[in-house]
Image: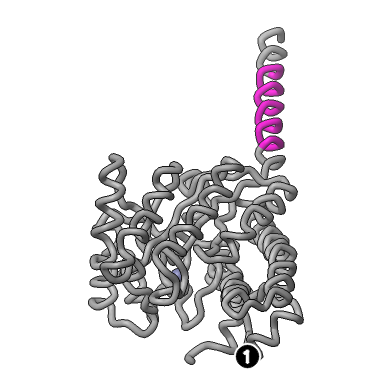
Amino acid sequence: MKRMKRALLVIFLVITAALVAVGQGRAARRVAVTFDDLPMTGDAGRSTGEGVLETNKKIVDALKASGVPAIGFVNERGLGAAEQREARTRALRAWLDAGMELGNHTYSHKSFYRTPLADFEQEVIRGEPVTRQLLAERGKRLRYFRHPFLNTGRTLASKRAFEKFLSARGYAVAPVTVDNSEWIFAREYADALAKNDSEKARRVAEGYVPYMESMFEFYEKLSVDLFGREIPQVLLVHANQLNGDHFSEVIEMIGRRGYEFVSLDEALSDPAYRSRDDYVGAVGISWLQRWLVTRGKEFRKEPSMPEYMRQFDPDYSGSDFKTRRGR
Ligand SMILES: [Zn+2]
C-alpha cells in the first residue's frame, strides 16, 4: 500500500512538472525574423552602393539594439556592377558581423511558377558564391533557402523535385508563417522619399506597424485553429528603407505581444514545421495557409491593407489564391 502511495505521488509530481512546462511554453510566444532581398529590395541600379550599405546598417543596428537574431536572404544579382559591388558586399558583411545569418534567395529572384525546374536550380547555384564565401570566412555554412515570391512551384511534381535538389545541396527550406504585404508599404515609402513627399512617407509609416500587428493577430489565431496552440512564427520582411527607418517600432510591437525572438533553427525545430504541405499555385501564401489547404480546409485570407494604402494597389487581393490562381 505504501509503495502504491509513493508511486501515485511520483505520477502526480511528473504530471505537475509537465503542466508547468507546458504553461511556460505558452507564456512566451516565439518568432524568428527573416529579411528577404538582400542587399536591398528592388533597388538594382537606383540607389548607390553607399545608400544600400547605410540602409542595411540601420536595420542591423535595430536588430542588435534589441538582441533580435535574424537571417537575411540574398539575391546576389543585387550586388550589382563593379562600382557598387564593394559597398553592397559590405552590406552583407554587416549582417554577419552582427551575428546574423545569411541564406540563398536565388540569383535574380525569378518565380519558380514561371521558370522551368532546371533553370530554377541554376538560379540557386548562381546565387551561392559570394554568400557562401562570406559565411565560410566565419566558419559558417550556407544552409537555408527562401523561395522568391514564396512560390514553391507550378506542380506538385516540380515542387517535390526541387525540394530533393535543395536537400541534396545541403539546404533546408525557410518557410514563412507571418506573410504580409509589407513590400507594398516599402515601395510607397521609397517612392515618397524619392519625391520628397514627407506627408506620404509619414502616412505610410504610420500605417505600417498597426498593419503588421493585424497580421500577427491573424496568424496567431490561424495557428491555434490548426495546431491547438501558437507555434513559433516565422516573420517575413524585406531589406528596404522602410525597415531601415521603422523596423525598431515593429520589434517593439512584437515584444509588446509577448514574443521572444528566436533563431530560425529554433523556430523550425517545432514539430509543426514537419506538417504536410501539398500546396502549389501562382500565389505565394503563408505556410499556415498551406497547411490549412493541405488538410482540405477552407482557405482563409489574411486582413487587407488599410484604406489609405489600397489606393496605391487598386487590384490588391493579398494572398487570395482563389481569385489570382492561374494568372
Ligand atoms: Zn524576395
Give SS at disc 1.
loop
* Nearest the eye: 269 or 235: 235
Circle count: 1
Would residue 40 appear left or right of 309 to someone viewing this image?
Answer: left
Residue at image position (69%, 74%) is: 198
Quadrant of the image occupied by residue 77: bottom left
Q: What main secondary structure does the magenta stretch of the protein show?
A: helix
Residue at 50% from the left image edge and 55% from the top image edge: 273
**Ligand 1 lies under 8 Å from the Cβ of mark 1:** no
Q: Which residues are magenta?
A: 8-24
Quarter occupied by the N terminus? top right
Residue 79 can be seen in this image: yes
Foreground pick, 206 / 219:
206
Q: Quadrant of residue 163?
A: bottom left
* Figure check: 221 above or below 282: above
The structure residue drawn at horizontal position 43% and vertical position 76%, both measured from the top left corner, is 46
Q: Which one is in front, 154 or 128?
A: 128
Q: Residues within 10 Å of mark 1 (few under 14, many from 20)?
A: few
Per the image, is 17 magenta? yes
Looking at numbered disc 1 in the image, what kind of residue is underneath it? Asp
Q: Is residue 131 positioned above or below 287 on the image?
A: above
Q: Residue at x 33, y 76 (%)?
A: 157
Please say whether residue 119 is one of the residues in the magenta stretch: no
Whole-percent x, y for residue 97 in the image: 40, 43
The image shows residue 237, relative to residue 230, as above or below, that is below
Give the quadrant of ligand 1. Answer: bottom left
Choose top left, top right, bottom left or bottom right for residue 80.
bottom left
Would you say residue 278 is visible in this rendering?
no
Mark 1 — residue? 315
Q: Position of residue 65 (x, y in %)?
A: 59, 42
**Whole-percent x and y of residue 87?**
36, 59
> What colour-coding does the image apply?
one colour
